[in-house]
Image: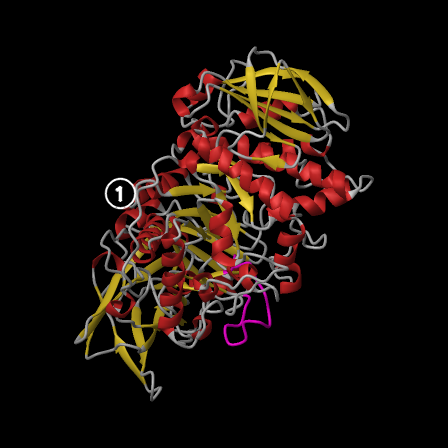
Amino acid sequence: MIFIKREFEAYLDEMDQITILLPNGSFNGESASFTLSDEKSTYPLEIIDRKTLQSSVKYICKTNMPITIGSKYMIIDEHSRKTDLQIGAVIRSQAFDEAFYYEKDDLGAQYQKGETTFTLWAPTASAVKIKLVAPKSKESIFYSLIREEKGIWRITVQGDLEGFYYTYLVCVNLVWREAVDPYAIASTINSESAVIVDKERINVPKVSMLPFNDATDAIIYELHVRDFSSHPKSGMVHKGKYAAFTEDPVEVSEIGMTGVPYLQSLGVTHIELLPLNDFGGVDEAEPDKDYNWGYNPLLFNVPEGSYALDPNDPYSRILELKNLINTLHHKDLRIIMDVVYNHVYIREDSSFEKIVPGYYFRHDEHGMPSNGTGVGNDIASERKMVRKFILDSIRYWLQEYDVDGFRFDLMGILDVQTINEVKEAVSVIKPGAIILGEGWELNTPLAADRKAMILNAKKMPGIAFFNDMVRDSVKGSTFNLFDRGFALGNTHKIALLKQSLAGSVQIDPNHKGLFLDPAQSINYIESHDNHTMWDKIAVCNSHENEETRIKRHRLAASVTLLSQGIPFLHAGQEFFRTKGGEENSYKSPDSINSLDWERKNRYSENVAYVRGLISLRKAHKAFRLSTVTEVKRHVRFPLDKGNLLMYHLNDVKQYGKYNHLLIIFHNGTNTENVTIPFSGEWEVLAEGSTASDLPIRKVNNEVQVPPISTVVLAQY
């Protein structure tokens, strides 16, 4: 680090504007003039504004001399006091963004057997070095990179550098900082250094799958890598690891089927895995010591090492994750990757902040980092090189790992243009890949009409959103543990329930609808966040016995799986997953978070019920309509009694073997005799604890609806 005695502060805040802060001490913060000097000349500055602050006097000065970002300048006042010119708010100006946008796709380390080229975007740096460390001798070698246009620094180093560790040393505002390459694709344990790998050694053949043409055909199952296998009775050997997904566990009589064969048998189409990229909060050297969901991103293009069999081997995590994905693909299961581009783990320690301080994050009107994410930083996705990083990263995961979609954490922090460009880029590489996200409105310094939130869904065609209207109308408010939705006995949320069943699109003039089409609606009642449904019911409906609470849980699941849109299940939801009442288990131990496979056997009747609903949904396209036009044409609600709602899919022979489907949702505690408003014979496909795509029995004119249940009727 270089130290310089600064007698005052000076910042470049616009390409031609400098802010100077003179302390109130000597000369009372007064100066009638300032000059700017480089190594060749000195130039006068024009003072255009002056304000007295509590401890200093603030001067805004104009310069007519073009400033070269990354070069060294000194500011001198009339009393011959001097300081270096630091990079200030100019970093966040549109002019800076335009001047330094770099469009090529060669950032990072490009390895060949005989040489490796390193390319880094660091426009505000006055010098950049690379530190290479030999993997065996641990000897360090330093090279200086050469500055090129658009803020690019580059060097080609001769020799075979496979396995070498590397970091960058970047000098900005006379301060040297060491950072890991944000474009790294491999790392040492605990993300201390990037590692140069030979892509030929990670070139695993992909499994060929047909394009997934219609998003509403998806049934998403959310899962955490470690939770999947960490339970003592999981039957999987490699507990908590990527490798557990490649196992074919031996069935034990008291547990039954587990692992990927169980996922396949359930009938879901997509497995959404919580963050797979390298994250903080778990020591990769002692991965069993701590637990974390993974929303602490460190290196965005490197797989997490705590899930690898050998986190010390940079190749291990890459190959094991690819094998996981291939295994799922062989089973006709697709993978959605949970991505966390909205924030970093610790802003000050991030490579972004060390390499280009102040650029990658949003700041408020006072120059302080904004905190809409609640973790101390918001990614400034609207800036060109931030957006480029996100797009480059998305393309990398698609092309290198063959993932089938992305779930954007706190997507409301990001901007509409970035998300639309993500959709465009994904569609080129893998048509049919699903993009979904949390579209919550968050307090970040971005205009409301630019936020990628649910209120702007109609500006983002093809992007799906977690639908909190579905969640809250069925279950009750997530933020009020005692609030009850329809499934828990509330009879005042029928209007919201109707909208939910219709995919939250506009079906009548009185309701605008949230979405352009039903494929934008992610219908869910629980996820990894907040209380599980089972735990909420235990509190809200503590006056009821377990048998009744099971019925309520089952009713909620039927709404999720029979509504228009995309159903989303939290892993273990089908066997009443509990976290012992823990609301926020992001770093709770395995005893709280692990998928309890014993419950799968204990509640096998409900597992069979959910499996039956899934098969019913997959058997008839009428439950999976793709457009708002189709929903308007075919969705009706012929009966609404407060505690009983009839949902009619009318004239749908073109979508399957039945012409009419009639679904009755009932949250009352007494049996209801319901007159069928349409003549003829009807097949019963679901009632009580049974659901199937095959008929259970037949009825005419009237059907008996059991307490707290869903009945599905079908007619040719």
Q: What residue is drawn where x is 54% and y is 29%? A: 695
Q: What residue is drawn where x is 26% and y is 71%? A: 198
Q: How many marks?
A: 1
Task: Give the image location of residue 388, x and y in percent.
Answer: 32, 50
Quarter of the image for residue 328 reads: bottom left
Q: What residue is drawn where x is 46% and y is 22%? A: 658
Residue matched to label 1: 428
Does 230 sit above or below residue 382? below
Task: Give the image location of residue 475, x and y in percent.
Answer: 66, 36
Task: Give the image location of residue 77, x and y in percent.
Answer: 40, 62
For badge 1, the amino acid type reads Val
Q: Secondary structure at mark 1?
A: helix
Task: Give the image location of residue 499, x and y in percent.
Answer: 56, 24
Q: Magenta segment, principal secondary structure?
A: loop
Region in magenta: 281-296
Residue 114 lies in the magenta-colored region: no
In the image, 119: left or right of 473? left
Q: Looking at the picture, tell me which residue is in the foreground, 313 or 192.
A: 313
In the image, 156: left or right of 540? left
Q: Looking at the picture, tell me which residue is in the foreground, 562 or 522.
A: 562
Is residue 27 in view? yes
Q: Looking at the picture, tell me which residue is in the foreground, 590 or 450.
A: 590
